[in-house]
Amino acid sequence: MAEENENESYKKYGDLYLAVRRGNWNAVQEFLEREPDALTAKINWKYQTPLYVAAAAGQVHVAKKLVEKLPEEKLEMQDYYGYTAITETVMRGNHELTKCILNKNKKLISITNHIGNLPLIQAIYYGQLEMARYLYALTPLDDLLPAKDYNGPNFFTYCIYTGTLDIALDLMKRHPPLGLARDKYAITPLLALASMPDLFPSGNLDRLVFWKRWIYEYCIHIPLNRDSKEIHLNVHKVETESQKAKTFISVPALLRHLVSNVLNILGIKHLYQMKLTHVQAQELLSLMCARITCLDYYERRDGCVEYAIIKAVENGIFEVASEMLKADPDLEWTFDGQKRNLLMLGVLHRQAKICSLLIGLDLNKALACYEDRETNGILHMAGMSGESRTMLNRIPGAALQMQRELQWFEETKRVFQPKVRVVPNTEGLTPRELFTKEHKDMLKEGEQWLKDTSTSCTVEFSRHVIQKMTFSSLYQQR
């Protein structure tokens, strides 16, 4: 019976609901004059007020007039899901209405929804990055401290995942402990950074063609400790005859004076943003690593420090692995759940730069002697194929992939001492035997690729390819 009465109450406001949705302010005003209590009534099954309905419908003019009529405290009313009207405006990126509501009741910036998220979290979660910047400037730092709840760590990790590193840097400088604080998914900002290869040069710089890399390295200059509102490009080769010194052009000025389609064709905008991201990520990493030097065991564990360097090695993020090892050399002795050390993981994931870094350590020979839980040694890691697929997907064709795997195995065997070449694992397989077993399918795919290629190419080219890349015979020779 009570439920029927509630349904009847919603029907009572049907005309008001439709008028608000359609943006008919005259009809809304007439209804409110007849029933003043409807201003704060819940007019649909979601328990939403007229203001919330107007915000959801994008009827800004109606919503602003409703804000004027509502008492300050009534702006804090929540719907069935614990959302206030500002939650709706934030998720939709409606800056005008968000500012209007916050100007009347600033406390809304700190009111969480039913799962404890601040409006700031809703903004960045739904990809409204400019709205997140606006709300971040208004949100009290106390609301983001890890001692209070997960909002601060959640926001920090979201900033990293979305590449909003200017905010992440500011937050790190304002409260450094946030860099190693766990969010509600038990992920720290340091771990999030170690999971994002594209934020660093080692993750995407090698993919640039030579002339774009030249522009990246020599034509784009991003000063350290810069004002975030004034970033400069150092353009050496576009100076006029009268310009003898280096020319610094601010980004807004550059975008105003240079032709937009030319910048797009040359990829200048993309290269600038890439380098800016790299600089910000490196600065953020340095600040985080400065904190791990003085951590005890429990602080390292809670900060996911060891897990972070493992992820950096697996993802091939040279900058993160190198910086963390400099900050805390004891991280050389990090092992994953399978009892594999960093060098073993580098070989397993085919991360050449990481391996070179670790081989340069004084402990490289000791690290090469370790075995995992199944007594797989360093050369067994080179013989496994499962974890190498991500890197191999960048190489076209199964034959070339197989060639790369053979080269990696032989190079690993050459670098490390003879003992690792013959010791079997718990299955009784030597590294060579494990390689053969793991790459059986790839070998067949490679041979089929060669056959298909030979039928579609000229006889001379086919003879060259077959001569260079017949893997069965190469296997027998090995």
Image (spheres, grey):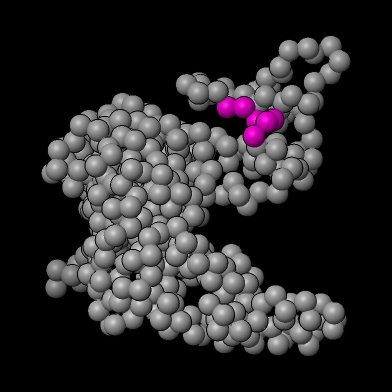
Residue found at x 72% / y 18%:
247
In this view, the residue in front, 395 or 477, is 477
**Residue 244 as seen in the image, left or right of residue 123:** right
Segment colored magenta: 217-222
Decide whether residue 364 is among the magenta residues: no
Q: Is residue 327 visible?
A: yes
**Placement of the N terminus among the 4 image quadrants:** bottom left
Q: Is residue 343 above or below residue 134?
A: below
**Residue 365 as seen in the image, left or right of residue 458:** left
**Residue 322 as seen in the image, left or right of residue 327:** right
Residue 320, by quadrant, is top left
Q: Is residue 349 above or below residue 33?
A: below
In this view, the residue in front, 134 or 375, is 375
How far from the left and from the top, in percent, is residue 19? Answer: 45, 54
* Numbered-mark total: 0
Q: Is residue 75 visible?
A: no
Single out the residue that lies furthest toward the front: 418
**Residue 72 as seen in the image, left or right of residue 95:** left
Residue 193, by quadrant, is top left
In this view, the residue in front, 469 or 331, is 469
Residue found at x 53% / y 43%:
201
How far from the left and from the top, in percent, is residue 388? Answer: 46, 68
How far from the left and from the top, in percent, is residue 365? Answer: 33, 52
How far from the left and from the top, in percent, is residue 364? Answer: 34, 50
Residue found at x 39% / y 74%:
431
In this view, the residue in front, 335 or 90, is 335
Decide whether residue 218 is among the magenta residues: yes
